[in-house]
Amino acid sequence: MTITLTLDPQTLTEGQTISASSFVTSVTDSASRSITKYSVYDSGADGGYFILNGVKLSDGAWHNLTAAQFAQLQYVAGPSGGSETISVKAYDGKSWSSAYSTTEKTTAPSGSSSVSSLLGELGVSSTITQQVTSSNSLNYNQMLTILQDAAVGGMTATKFSALQTLASMLNQSGGLSTSAYVQQIADDVILGNPANAYWNGGSSTTTKLGNLSAKSTQTQVDELIGKWFLGTDLPSLSLSGIGESNLNPTYQTSTLPLFGNTGTPSYLDVNQGYLGDCYFVAALGETALQDPTLIENMITNNGNGTYSVCFYINGQPDYVTVNSQLPVMGGGYVWSNGSTLEFSNGTVDDWVALVEKAFVELNEQTAAASYGGHTAGNAYEDINGGTAITLSEITDQTFNTYNLNPTESTSSLTSLMSTLSTDFTEGDEIILSTPNVDIGNLVGDHMYIVTGINLTNGTVSIQNPWNTAYSGSLQMSFTDTIAQLASDNVSIYSTTGTKVA
């Protein structure tokens, strides 16, 4: 039995969109079976790409599709002057064919500069057009302006195609250079993202949004821009899903500096607040202690009241934009430290609360939610409870797990302390978790920041992320012996310095 495909080469103009099936002129199955699946591959050499229902497929990988999906699949040509390989395989329910390949070449649109022509079709001002074409680059403010100009009056087939072409040119040979942040959030607006399914905007309920299309209204485009560039798709403040009554919160614009008086993040900036995300804020605090520069690079001020925040999902950077609005409690509620912020709180800076909000918004993406072990959604309650995987999400490092128990031998504990002491001295992040039982200063089912390892004394210095927001009798900073921690059945997590593959 043999399945034979005939593929024809294509010469397309920059940004032209065609049906992917146009590459295949015939499919012959010697057993006369119907083709039920196709698998497609593009080398990505010139920036062209496949797109299915508004979502870009990754280059350099095979994608298996049903016959119905293949009929809907489109191909978008990259910048002019490029050429890349397109490969297709077919499946008849019994076996796959060999891979058949052809080439796609891209030429420039006739009669005008490709970039200036695209920006003209999008209604972009001559000032922005001149800046972009003269530098062959795009910054955050320019990309934001381009999208806002294109949004006026809603989408058309011409504008949608022009935006798809523009997206295909970012950081491609002969295209436009930009930051990884701008490229990702531009792709999220133009090419789609699962998080685009709904709009929240701070409400306790969601409304449908959807990926950009040629029929998108101006409202839809504005909300997509707001979600990715302006941070206006605020998380829900409802906590009913975790059985908590909320504290009459409203979003208010904070005027605190990003970092405190020293201009440097500190683990003492962490105050957990009214949410069970100790696993996250403890990892943030530990990173601030061991590598404050990483925190400084994690969150960047865009200069317009918004911030870019970078996480890592399966070793890949994933950016979120947040604005400076934070949940403030009403009804006279106030923490022991004087803060009225409902969740992560403090009185000297905003970085922890902003990164926490960004983590909530990140969780709306299905891949990120799955990686973190959460249900996807844009609500604070969705990140209630979690694991040490946040060490990887923050630092892009793998980590080792040490589950202690009362039967640990003295030599085993001594060896572990030696390992932890070396890790801590080398700047690795170490956090600690407890089982369900409260013991001494240790709260059950809680995560802690490790602030020191004393090998000589066999002790671990510990910081509770409740910090100054807490007003009870427990010590927030204390020291325990490794033997005591073993008898308490704690687990310790330490980053390795090795990036996630």
Image: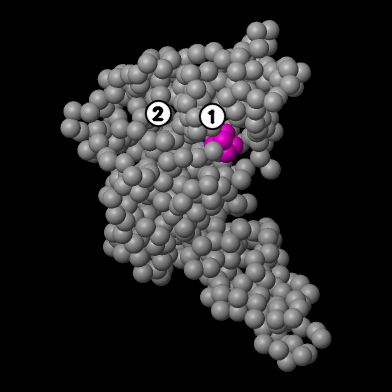
- Give the percent coordinates (x, y) of residue 353: 38, 31
Query: Would you place residue 7 above or below residue 77 in this image?
Result: below
Which quadrant holds the C terminus? Answer: top right
Q: Main secondary structure of the magenta part?
A: helix
Which quadrant holds the N terminus? Answer: bottom right
Q: Nearer the viewer, mark 2 or mark 1?
A: 1
- Give the percent coordinates (x, y) of residue 290: 57, 21
Residue type beneath disc 1: Thr
Q: How crowded is mark 1: few (under 14 residues within 10 Å), some or many (20 or more)?
A: many
* Residue at 25% in and 36% down: 247
Inspect the magenta stretch and tell me whether residue 494 lies in it.
no
- Give the percent coordinates (x, y) of residue 482: 63, 17
Badge number at residue 434: 1
Q: Describe the element under mark 2 as helix, strand or loop.
A: loop
Report the side of 464 relative to 100 (left or right).
Answer: left
Residue type beneath disc 2: Gln
Query: Would you place residue 457 above or below residue 216 in this image?
Result: above
Q: Which residue lies furthest to the right in this view?
A: 1
Q: Describe the element under mark 1 as helix, strand or loop.
A: loop
Q: Can residue 385 be seen in this view?
A: yes
Query: Would you place residue 6 above or below residue 415 in this image?
Result: below
- Report how far apart the C-alphas of labels 2 and 1 lie in the structure: 16 Å
Q: Give the range drawn in magenta.
A: 388-392
**Residue under label 2:** 272
Inspect the magenta stretch and tell me whether residue 389 lies in it.
yes
Query: Would you place residue 436 above or below residue 80 in this image?
Result: above
Q: Compare residues 34 and 436 and report the one nearer the observer.
A: 436
Q: Compare residues 468 and 19 and report the one nearer the observer.
A: 468
Q: Compare residues 343 and 131 and report the one nearer the observer.
A: 343
